[in-house]
Image (tube, grey):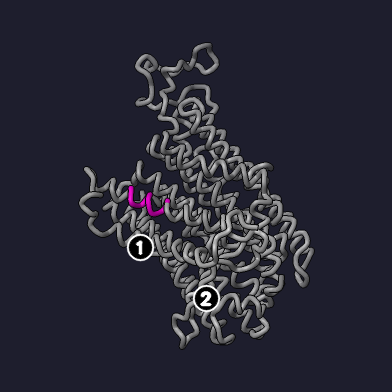
Amino acid sequence: MTVIDISASVMQFLLAFVVVAPLLGAVAALLPAPPGLKGKNPDQAVLRHGVTVTGAVLIATIVLAVGFDHDHPATMQATTDISWIPALDVRIHLGIDGISLPLLLLTALLTFLCALYSYFKLPAGPSPKAFVALVLVLESGTLATFAVLDLLLFFLAIEMVLIPMYFLIARWGGGQRQAAAWKFILYTLLGSVVMLLGILLIGLKSGTFDMVSLATDNGRGLTTSVQVIAVLAIGLGLAVKTPMWPLHSWLPDAHTAAPTVGSVLLAGVLLKMGTYGFVRILLPIAPDGMRTFAPYLAAFAVVGIVYGSLACLALARTGAKGDLKRLIAYSSVGHMGFVLLGIATMTPTGVNGALFANIAHGLITGLLFFLVGAIKDRYGTADLDTLAGATGAALYGRAPRLGALLAFAAIASLGLPGLAGFWGEMLTLFGAYSPAEGLSRPAFRTFMAIGAFGTLLTAAYMLIVVRRVCMGEHTPHSRLSPDDRAPHAADGPQPSGAAGARPAATTPQLADIQTYEAAAWTPLAALTVLAGLWPAVLLGLTDPAVQKLLAGGKS
């Protein structure tokens, strides 16, 4: 069933347009604007160009989704297959199925919302032209990662995003941005070198780099030893990009230093490329190798879940001087641990849960980083002690709509039933309860129990964050800074229990949610609710494709 019947040639064009248009837009952003388009402010003109290009890509992606045959989501659609390097049998092979389509939509949506947000709130840094061009190159590389069906093209696409993200952190970031950017690029490039060796091993031993052919072969053309080596090499590279504990240490620094839109794109789409590689490449192409390493992957995943949650609890406690952006970054380590646990089960239930958790994490954590960026802009800091101690009323009293949306995003992140975060974690744990044949049930049920304990820790630190940032500290005296105090309150603090102890004058209002912020954040909040209440929208796409992938290309 297709919502609108679109011809195959138009679908091919749309997918090629989605991948190539941001790259062409990046080149155009660096060129001098035509006289009629310069306007009074050239900086605003190039930012408007970014919104236009990302908006066109989003519309094309939506049309692609509308024309997608939802009755056959396991079939590659909108395919293009052109010989590129005949000597190596490298082809420009593009296509989408039920696994890649949701990730394309998520990438196009988040990039457009970031461009829209930046139009009104550009981060401090060098030329806006360079900023827009880097965001567009990053979008092109990410979309290509989810659309290409050739191993070498996949590698080139996944590497294409590293340099733009490096410069976004290094040139538009906050404190310690240079060190964070270098750490990001060194970790990810080192992982890339190892991953390339694994890809070359598969291609040379099988005689092709075509991902569809390799998935259909289902590892029959590769010996077990080759599969084990390939999974170790490619898996290490993808684990760095996911990131998996203990290869995660670049992530908190990168998120803390990155500008708001950099953090949104890093968490929302870049982390998904690593887990997508596990599903698209390792599960179908090297199943014996994955079966060997699945228990270790699951063990690292659940350690990451607990470690990320404990790190967040440590940052959230009073007096820890924890950075709210850093806390959300550590929460990503835990959430991506659930994704890896689902993949490690090698079952349709677990892998579907992993793919659902991927999308849910992109929506919810993208929203959280938008909100934290807005809070940092208003307060001038993301330090939790400062935010909680700035006023007894905190966000609920100073910017109630902003506080309410932060509380909503935090509750969605902890996996409340009815919101998107719930389904991925639940399906992942169900998958771990009954893993694939050949995997140890006692071991995976232990991992399931540890993962379930991690959900309790997640609830604990998220509720602490909501209490402290939205409600403030429970102290006997108001902790307003001298700058925030009203003139008549400067003589001294008043008892919090007395009537009229905290008059409106002692709780200065912050700017609440602005129109452009509402435009950028509302789609993420709405989709979080939609995915939570109607999970079949996403699972109906992914499940047939996952079933076919795990069955070796057989529906």
Residue assigned mark 1: 24
Q: Nearer the viewer, residue 248 or 515?
A: 515
Q: Residue at x 54, y 70 (%)?
A: 79
Instruction: Give the left or right position of residue 55, taking residue 469 as reference.
Output: left
Predominant secondary structure in magenta? Answer: helix
Regarding mark 2 in the picture, which secondary structure is present there?
Answer: helix
Residue assigned mark 2: 151
Front: mark 1 or 2: 1
Residue 67 makes an appearance in the image: yes
Q: Which mark is residue 234?
A: none
Q: Position of residue 288 (x, y in %)?
A: 69, 77
What amino acid does circle 2 point to? Leu
Regarding mark 1 in the picture, which secondary structure is present there?
Answer: helix
- Spatial separation of the CA atoms under disc 1 and disc 2: 24 Å
Instruction: Give the left or right position of residue 553, taking residue 314 as reference.
Output: right
Q: Nearer the viewer, residue 40 or 320?
A: 40
Picture layout, residue 118 above or below residue 233: above
Which quadrant of the view contains residue 541? bottom right
Q: Which residues are magenta?
A: 48-55
Q: Residue at x 51, y 67 (%)?
A: 9
The furthest residue to the top? 499
Residue 354 makes an appearance in the image: no
Q: Residue at x 67, y 42 (%)?
A: 418
Q: Position of residue 347 (x, y in %)?
A: 72, 65
Residue 432 included in the magenta stretch of the image: no
In contact (CB < 8 Å): disc 1 and disc 2: no
Of the 4 image quadrants, the one containing the C terminus is bottom right
Q: Residue at x 23, y 45 (%)?
A: 39
Picture layout, residue 406 above or below residue 75: above
Give the class, few, some or many, for how many residues have Cα within 10 Å of label 1's Cα (few <14, many ≥20): some
